[in-house]
Amino acid sequence: MKPEKKKMSPRLKFLISVLVFYGVTAFFCPDTVRDALAGFGGMLTKVIPILGMVFGFLFLVNLFVNPGWIRQHIGAESGAKGWLYAVISGILISGPPYIIYPMLGKLKQHGARNGLLAAMLYNRNVKPQFLPAMVYYFGLRYTLILSIYIILFSLLNGKILERFVRE
Amino acid sequence: MDSFHMIWTTVGLVMIPLESTFLGRRFAVARNVLNFFFAIVVAAATVYTMEITG
């Protein structure tokens, strides 16, 4: 019987192919690779503090927040209080999607309700830090009306999504 | 302009694979489709409310 060959993981294949591309490019155009690596270094220094925050958050969730707590506050039994938490946390939460989605994925794993996660994501559109700029450019009335509609429709969004996506 | 703003901020086709990885494919697709229609409704409601309160 032939020994079974171990398959290379797609992640490793991707990494190797990137390194090969870099190697080939460095051979023909070393300046381009130097610029690319400098760009990569700059991006990495910007992303590392954010990634640190994410890992910190995940660490704290694993340490202090147990599935029982999540089920009670934003789980199936959370009720109206859960929707309130979803709206408030959605407004206050900020950061790029590659940080938000893993965090919400972790909450989902621990029993958070799909509708509440959708409501949270929808409420990210009410950005307190940009409200002054929005008022300046579009006026207070427009900003208020739009923000109120976003909050109201986030609840509807969550409710409808729960009909399509079972827990 | 309102619709554009809402679709720009709530619909993320490029991010669907990432969203699917962590929250499920059905969740990501349903949410983005819903957000597309909601963007139009929210924009229309905002404009209508601006008109009747202005």
Image (cartoon, rainbow, N blue to C red):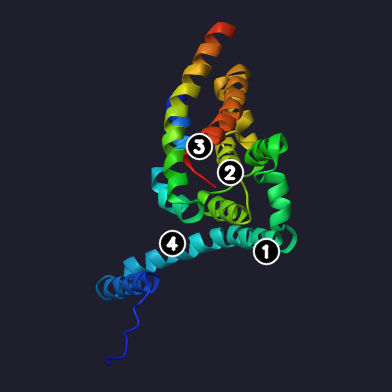
Label located before the other in sequence (1 or 3): 1
Nearer to us of marks 1 and 4 is 1
Tell me the residue that label 3 is attached to.
A163
Tell me: A123 left or right of A72. Answer: left
Residue at x 57%, y 28% (from the top left corner): A150
Chain ID, mark 2? A
Residue A32 spot, x, y in % from top left: 32, 66
Q: Could you tell me if residue A110 is visible in this image?
A: yes
Residue count near mark 2 (Cα–Cα under 10 Å), binned few <14, some 14–19, many ≥20: many
Residue B2 or A163: which is nearer the viewer?
A163
The residue type indicated by label 4 comes to: Gly
Chain ID, mark 4? A
Disc 1 on helix, strand or loop?
A: helix
Q: Which mark is residue A59?
A: 1
Q: CA distance from mark 2 to mark 4?
A: 34 Å
Q: Which mark is residue A117?
A: 2
